[in-house]
Amino acid sequence: MHLGLLVPSSNTVMEEELSQYVIVHSTRIALRTVDEISLKNMNTEIEKAVQLLKLLTDCNPAVIVYGCTSGSFVEDIRKSFAATTIPVITTSEAVVNALKALQVGSVSVGTPYTDAINQKEKAFLESHGFTVSDIKGLNLTDNTEIGKQETAYELARSLKKADAIFISCTNFRTFNVIQKLEDGLGIPVISSNSASLWGALTDSGEKAEIKSISGLGRLLEELP
């Protein structure tokens, strides 16, 4: 499947992880620091970036993913994609849909973010009906530093018990630990990137063509 990706300029992880399973064609919008002001400033560039994304139609992408978790929960950005006729899903939408598909009521969340951004994320998840049993962050704002982290496993293991674990941030490496976490904890584990991949397959209508993806937890292993 060909996927169009709109990703923060300092993201060094999402393209690498998704490219293991789909063909990624991306463009970038400026972000170096993960704080509310910087995220909202980045979002002002979306409509301009959508014009660049139109060039991706030459590659026939089945879907466009806005690949920034915090950027898509700090404010409503849907109107910024009105100019494109290609299906669009944001990472935050994909996370919500994935948790609902897994039929979980409570979730514990591990992030690289500061407490201020974590509280925004907690409120976002609660607004969609989930109980946030725990949320912990690494207190990082430099997105380049976030991309260097190899701490998702330890962070997820430190969270309080819930129906599921969510590891947030598309620039936080998780594909190498999701299955190990699920096997050890006995509950579903999703990440921003696994949910984005699942959401892209779902929204594109191409999910049925991929029977299952092993190694990324039950969300993707149980594709119909």
Image: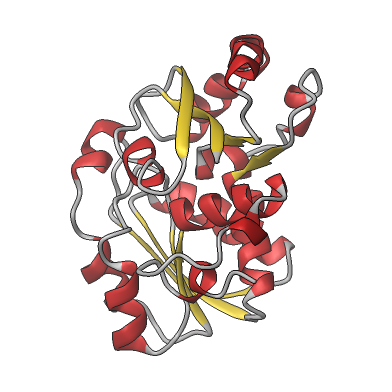
The reply to whether residue 158 is in sight is: no
The quarter of the displayed image where residue 88 is located: top right
The front one of 35 and 175 is 175
Residue 30: where, in percent of width, then height? Answer: 44, 17
The C terminus - image quarter: bottom right
The residue at the point 39 percent across, 83 percent down is: 160
Q: Position of residue 185 (x, y in %)?
A: 35, 87
- Residue depicted at x 37% and y 80%: 182
Check the image and report above or below for 176 versus 165: above
Name the quadrant of the N terminus: top right
Percent x, y for residue 180? Answer: 27, 76
Front residue (pair 157, 139): 157
Q: Is residue 189 left or right of residue 94?
A: left
Q: Is residue 107 left or right of residue 54?
A: left
When the figure is inspected, residue 201 is found, relative to residue 3, above or below; the finding is below
Query: Could you tell me which residue is drawn at 39 percent across and 90 percent down?
Result: 186
